[in-house]
Amino acid sequence: MSRRDRKPENAGPTQRQLRAGELVRHALVEVLGREDLRDPDLVGISVTVGEVRASPDLKHMTAFVAPLGAGDAQKIAAALTRASGYIRSRLAKSVDMKFTPQLHFIPDVSYDTATHIEALLRKPEVARDLRDKDES
């Protein structure tokens, strides 16, 4: 491999990783929406898959999950990790890939962060400062 063919260390994911991650995300949404998972922490809970990140070799994928409505994201991620073997077998049937990736589930805190930022922006002091800046 020549020097110019190497990818810089700080570069983002490749187009291949992005495509594979999105393909697996769509399949996970279908599997989680359709399947009746028997874990007590998942009964009656709707789960959203915000993002799936793929490793460079596409053999491991990390899914960021959060509950829709009420629920503990940490408990849901742990329950999905326990059921990852079953989910992976269902994923293998719906996704045409050379290898079915190992799945890792992590709680998605981006929704909580967005809610916190929105609450900060609605504070009277911040709104006043933003108004003053727009008038200048």
Image (spheres, rainbow, N blue to C red):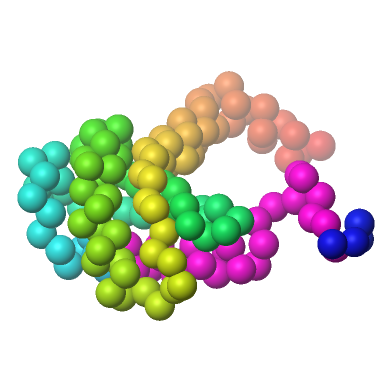
Query: Residue 75's image quarter?
Result: top left
Residue lying at 15% horizontally and 63% vertically, measured from the top left: 35
Q: Residue at 10% x, 59% y: name it.
A: 36
Whole-percent x, y for residue 83 in the image: 21, 48
- The residue that appears at 69% across and 52% down in the rendered structure is 12
Magenta region includes residue 66: no
Depth order, front residue of 112/89:
89
Helix, strand or loop for the magenta stretch, by majority: helix
Residue 6: x, y in percent? 83, 57
List the single residue furthest toward the top. Answer: 125
Can residue 17 be found in the magenta stretch? yes
Magenta stretch bounds: 5-29
Residue 2 x/y as whole percent: 90, 61
Quarter of the image holding residue 101? bottom left
**Between 11 and 43, the one nearer to me in the picture:** 11
Q: Position of residue 108 (x, y in %)?
A: 41, 41
| Image-based side of 131 in relation to 50, left or right | right
Residue furthest to the front in view is 1
